[in-house]
Amino acid sequence: MTIELAPSILSANFARLAEDAKAALEGGGTVLHVDVMDGHFVPNITIGPLVVAALRKALPNAILDCHLMIENPDNYIPAFVEAGASWISVHQEACVHLHRTLQLIASHGCKPGVVLNPAHGCKPGVVLNPATPVHMVDEVLDMVHHLLIMSVNPGFGAQKFIPGALQKIKTLVEVRESLGLSFRIEIDGGVALDTVGDIVRAGAELLVAGNAVFGKGDIRENAKKLLGAARAATLTRA
Ligand code: DX5
Ligand code: ZN
């Protein structure tokens, strides 16, 4: 299992976004998590395709993991693809026709035989809020590149980790195994030095972290420490 850190720019200094993002990648982050909020699906407004396009220009090879916390995502998916998103995830709770939405994202993916920068060519993901059972997405698990478990209620950074997410990760690991699938399991919310051990031992591989990376202190060091703690935890038993 490859553990990867996905620094969430939500907690970065937006006035020097590219520099902060670069620092997080230099500290060992391999995926840049981009939180898109519309003030309707979640009670906060953040950024849109323009910022994704600016990040893509500043970081041509970065994997941009766009987490859409918006209503009617189908209306905006093409704009995020155009802006340079690498991965696009949508909330199960926001999609009446989730299967169709995932097809839409995948339709923008890499075409066989076409060599693209691996950071480009959209990969679909689905996200579950803390109150949504894992089995709500059973029928689309074979369509997703990653399954994102929210371990806080979406909308804000620096919230407290909800421990019920651990059981959801464990259930997903079992379901993935029983179905012979290979989607990756991502966790988002409250990932920090004191929670990352349990998270990784439960089976999450993609660790989104905002406050723990950008909150205070040196961004590179924070990322390095968190990733180190996560990797060390894979060596110990749950
Ligand atoms: C919350 C966002 C998260 C957020 C996590 O709605 O989806 O990505 O940045 O922040 P931390 O790591 O600070 O809990
Ligand atoms: Zn997020």
Image (tube, rainbow, N blue to C red):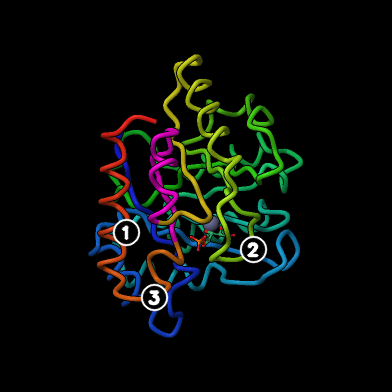
Which residue is labeled 1 in the image? 62
Which residue is labeled 2 in the image? 155
Give the alpha-carbon distance from disc 1 to disc 3, as whole Å: 23 Å
Give the alpha-carbon distance from disc 1 to disc 2, as whole Å: 24 Å
Q: Residue at x 45, y 16 (%)?
A: 180
| Rendering quarter of residue 72 | bottom right
Q: Check the image and report above or below for 64 versus 118.
A: below
1 or 3: mark nearer the eye: 3
Q: Out of 96 and 171, give the one closest to the viewer.
A: 171
Helix, strand or loop at disc 3? loop
Q: Earlier in the sequence, mark 1 or mark 2?
A: 1
Helix, strand or loop at disc 1? loop
Image position of 104 (left or right of 233): right
Q: Check the image and report above or below for 174 versus 49.
A: above
Q: Which residues are magenta?
A: 193-209
Which residue is labeled 3 in the image? 216
